Amino acid sequence: MKTATIALGGNSLMRPEDHGTAQEQFERMESTCEGLAEMVVEGYDLVLTHGNGPQVGNILLQNEIASHSVPALPLDICGAESQGQIGYMFQQTLENELNKKGLQRTVSSIITQVIVDEDDPAFKNPSKFIGPGYNESEAERIRREKDWDIKETSEGEYRRVVPSPKPQEIVEREVLEDLVFSENEGHIVVAAGGGGVPVVKDENGLLRGVEAVIDKDRASEVLAADIDETFFVMLTKVEKVYLNYGEENEEPIDSMTVTEAKKYLDQGHFPPGSMGPKIEASIHFLEEGGEKVLITSPENLLDALNEETGTYIYPG
């Protein structure tokens, strides 16, 4: 079997214009899984990862609303909760799509822990915005009551910020590798949802969850490298990667090498808040032994696999 690790953005499952109902999310999931099912038809065995920004944001908001009567849960548990929620939707929807095509596969979602360094500089400089927005007076009150780090996102709006440390290792990597490369074909794995649950390991090897959010693309790349995958796909809102994106002289990139990707990154073509983490994850994956990376949109996935669109990145 050909194998690939595919990272889906949280917005591919829930768009900004959506209300966030279960029905809406299942409809988005069906659209996404149609393309994934076609990959299986074409002979791919899949490892799926996903973002969770909209979903975990709603969980945090529900925490806020109910906190006067029900104890709020810490961020690591909210992340695990979103993994279960989205994993369930993947399992049901993708298996249904495969059954329509006469294919029998088992889709399994694994609650995934990702080790980070307790001394990572990100813990001293929280930068990842999460949860709902507040006005200035609300932000000041919540800052005092909850001891949260809160920063201004735009004029007059404030949101909580949490650390976003670099992922180092997937705790469940051996289980995932056994499932993906089992002699019995048919396992499709959903893992490292939302970047995984961030944990630190003490001197005795004991794990402890921390209040942080790991970048989904970086965690997906570590997962792919940990289980010796060679093909890494990131699905996002654009069909291709662009130079000068959004400008009159924007230029699509069909393919590039690691050397070229580093040059364009240094030149500022890939901002930290958008394409930057994807390019950095691509570079690291290929430098760790990966063979190729594809960046494209979900609706263009099949054409991109046939090298008719999308952006490919190769070693060199």
Image: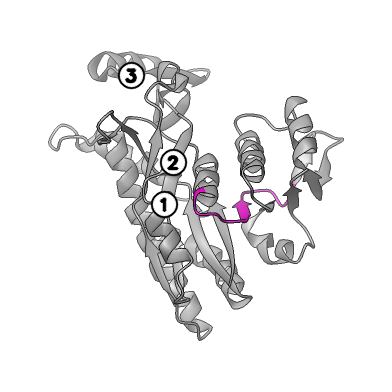
Q: Identify the residue shown where x is 58% and y is 61%.
A: 4
* Quadrant assignment for the C terminus: top right
Question: Where are the magenta residues, as a range?
Answer: 226-240
Q: Amino acid at mark 2?
A: Glu
Q: Are marks 1 and 2 in contact (CB under 8 Å)?
A: yes
* Quadrant assignment for the N terminus: bottom right
Q: Amino acid at mark 3?
A: Glu
- Tell me the CA gap for discs 1 and 2: 8 Å
Q: Along the line of sight, which residue is nearer the eye, 165 or 310?
A: 165
**Mark toward the start of the polypeptide (3 vs 1):** 3
Question: Residue 139, percent across and down?
Answer: 35, 18
Question: Residue 46, percent across and down?
Answer: 53, 64
**Which element type, helix, strand or loop, lies under badge 1?**
helix
Question: Residue 34, percent across and down?
Answer: 56, 70
Q: Does the magenta-highlighted stretch encompass residue 230?
A: yes
Q: Are marks 2 and 3 in contact (CB under 8 Å)?
A: no
In this view, 115 is above or below 33: above
In this view, 63 is above or below 11: above
